[in-house]
Image (cartoon, rainbow, N blue to C red):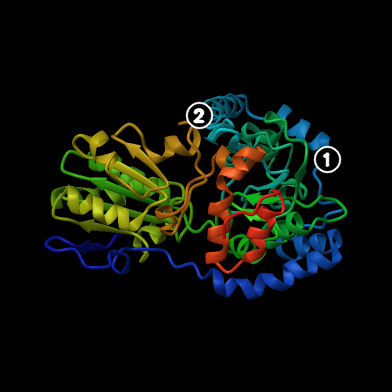
Amino acid sequence: MISRIDLRGSLPADLRDVLPRAELDVEAALEKVRPICEDVRHRGAAAVRELTARFDGVELETTRVPAEALARALEELDPAVRAALEESIRRARLVHRDQRRTDITTQVVPGGTVTERWVPVDRVGLYVPGGRAVYPSSVVMNVVPAQEAGVPSLAVTSPAQKEFGGLPHPTILAACALLGVEEVYAVGGAQAVAMFAYGTEECRPATMVTGPGNIWVAAAKRLLKGRIGIDSEAGPTEIAILADETADPVHVAADLISQAEHDVIAASVLVTTSVALADAVEKELPGQVAATRHSERITEALAGRQSGIVLVSDIDDGLKVVDAYAAEHLEIQTADARAVAARVRNAGAIFVGPYAPVSLGDYMAGSNHVLPTGGCACHSSGLSVQTFLRGIHVVDYTREALAGAAAHVCALADAEDLPAHGAAIRARFDWEVPA
């Protein structure tokens, strides 16, 4: 059901070449989404509605979800789901509120200061996936940090669903209502990203688009990056587990399965020092998979080239492997898990010990589950309040403070053969700044 890679002994020079990884050819998808985005650019809402009919089988009169549909969805929401969403929102607010930045003023010299101001983007479009599953949790993870950052205008979009009268899933609409989001659109795929990038008669353009989606969403983000800011190009979801002989194989198997449940190309990787644990997990998987609702999808994901069990000689080598893999989600199930977790350099989010599974982070830990995939955790972070803020330097110098720097500025300007830079300094003084 799941393959093995034996890296005991010596690790290869480039671990990325041998580790399991899902293949996502965003570049190839670019040429397919380009005409879609251009159509939206030139024809606006009419193009969005026609594309929604073509790809989702839904004929829309308007792309915007009516206010009464949001209210009705919240009114009809299962009380248990409402309570869970409210608690998820509460916990997420606690974590993200503490991420707020304060302006800092540094006195560089007497009379010369630089202040870093943190300013939210003007408007964001938040994408919430549809398809195989419904993700009200992604509404929470997108909206809460944007709200806590102080973004003055935000809109949510999610694919139109034929079975719900052309609206997004009612649980997504209810989550929007709980969060006070009034502007919601029934649009998915590349056309949704283009709608936010260019604007239509029904939707104002956004400054930034965030949220996970399929390959067409990722390709549209890549194509339109620059016109809009983006959080990341989300690829297939992934979990890596670094475990030793102290780990419970039942827990490890369950966590691998939980991530494989998302998609047939979801990645589930176990990195372990223990052959006995690897054997026990392999033995445990078939029974647990057979008991799940989505066993066929999970079986395909676990058997795919993107999943596997990696054997390593010791925890030091295991850390090298997981740092090279740079997983979206990384669980540490080892002796002294906190100390091991503290040594990890590359991961979207780290889950420490047997009682912090990825499922907790997906819904209720307070952390954000919109995380970098495909190894991007080695250079990128997950969604946070910081995603929606820009640092702007405010430079405030007196005449005396500028005079103290003038000779240095002119010397560097001359060194770079940019004499007009020096002239701009000299123009402010009655005396000659030394060349």
Q: Measured along the vertical axis of the image, is residue 168 above or below residue 364?
A: below
Tag 2: Cα neighbours inside 10 Å, few (<14), some, or many (≥20)? some
How many residues crowd mark 1 within 10 Å: few (<14), some (14–19), many (20+)?
A: some
Q: Which mark is residue 95?
A: 2
Q: Residue under label 1, please give it.
A: 66
Q: Residue furthest left?
A: 9
Image quarter for residue 404? Answer: top right
Q: Where does residue 340 sit, x and y in percent of width and height?
A: 24, 40
Identity, as a three-letter code, of the amino acid under mark 2: Val
Q: Assign the C terminus to one quadrant of the image.
A: bottom right
Q: How far is mark 2 from mark 1, CA to CA?
A: 32 Å
Name which residue lies at 73% across and 73% down: 35
Numbered label tally: 2
Front residue (pair 90, 136) = 90
Percent of width and height locating residue 111: 60, 33
245 versus 313 height, above or below: above
Q: What residue type is labelled 1?
A: Pro
- In this orientation, which residue lies closer to the viewer: 114 or 206? 114
Residue 61 sits above or below residue 169 on the image: below
Identified at 62% across, 51% down, the residue is: 130
Q: Which of marks 2 and 1 is in front?
A: 2
The mark that comes first in sequence, 2 or 1, is 1
Q: Is residue 156 visible?
A: no
Residue 104, x across and y down, in percent? 56, 32
